[in-house]
Structure formats: C-alpha cells, structure tokens
Amino acid sequence: MKRWLAFLLAWAVLAAIHEGTHALTAAWYGVFESFGVTPFGFEVRFLTPVHERSGVHWGVIAGASNLVTVAMGYLLLFLGRGWAHLRGSFATASVFYLTLLALLADPLNLSIGPFLYGGDANGIAAGFCVDRYVVQGVALVLLLTNRELIAGRLFPLYGVEVRHPLFRPLVRWGSQPQARDR
C-alpha cells in the first residue's frame, strides 16, 4: 500500500508542477482563465479559444511545462544517490516514482498522446510553426533515451530489478550506479 501511495503522491506532484507551469506561463502572457479537475486529470483553461491561438507565446505556454518536468527528472536522477540509500522509506519511494514519471510522462504525452487526444504537442507545433510530427519525433527520441536512462541508471540506483522487456537496458553503461548502504 505504501508503494501505491508513494506513486500517487509522485503523480500528484508531477501533475501540479506540469499544470502549474502551464498556469504560470499563461498568466505571464495574460491568457490564464482557470484551473480545473476533469475525469482525465488536471486542466488549465485559457481565455483564448483554441482556433485563435497563434504566436510563439503559445509554444512557450504549451512547451515550458514539459521542459520543466523533464529537467526535474534529470535533476532527480542526478541527485538520486542521496535518496536511494534510504531503503524502505516513503520519501525514497516517492522520489523514485517522481523521477520515473518525470522522465517518462511528458515525452510519452508529446510523442504518443497527440494520436489520441491532441495536447501540448499541438500547442508547441502551432506556437513555433513546426509540423506536429516533428514535435512528436523529437519527443519519441527523448522518450527512448529516457527509457534507457531509467533501465540503465535509475533502476540499478534504487535496486529495482525488472524483467519486463520494455525496461531492460539496450545500451550497457560503463559502470552501473549503485545505491549506498545496500
């Protein structure tokens, strides 16, 4: 039960940071309307209707949240040795899941999500005047890279053993990180 609570806490923190960044950047540009909760999760509502959105600021509003959460994932991975040695603690499990989600959620959202529900990739594409498939392609490369970091660095650091082929490393890292005080 503790693991599920840690996962849910990590998901809520990541969602709050992601949507909060949307809200802050939208407020900065004067287009923030409200913040709500839907059956699919949290949502920021904007003053400007979708069909009227154009300009670089929409690329920033749509993309900054993805940049912030993925950067947070890299920072947490880099600082992971400080948490990994605290085996069995709720805080360690929460940081592990937050790192995992921060590295996977937004690249997955940007690469696969647009086929299902649109989302941030459309805003980034419209704002920066690039094809949505370019955004999706870059996000897919990031997703695959982060998958390797998770399989080759994050899991060994926290002592997680995974047999599922989606999370087995394809690239062998020089030296595997080890958690302290095993």
Image (cartoon, rainbow, N blue to C red):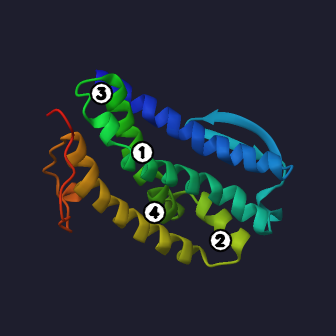
Please identify, in this view, whether the residue under mark 4 or under mark 1 is nearer the observer: 1
Q: Earlier in the sequence, mark 4 or mark 3?
A: 3
Residue 125, image x and y in percent? 65, 71
- For label 3, the residue is 3
- For label 1, the residue is 76
| Residue type at tag 3 | Arg
**Secondary element at tag 2:** helix
Please identify, in this view, whether the residue under mark 1 or under mark 2 is nearer the observer: 1
Q: Earlier in the sequence, mark 4 or mark 1?
A: 1
Q: CA distance from mark 4 to mark 2?
A: 15 Å
Pointer 2: residues within 10 angstroms few (<14), some, or many (20+)? Answer: many
Q: CA distance from mark 4 to mark 3?
A: 27 Å
Q: Earlier in the sequence, mark 2 or mark 3?
A: 3
Q: CA distance from mark 4 to mark 1?
A: 24 Å
- For label 4, the residue is 112
Please identify, in this view, whether the residue under mark 2 or under mark 3 is nearer the observer: 3
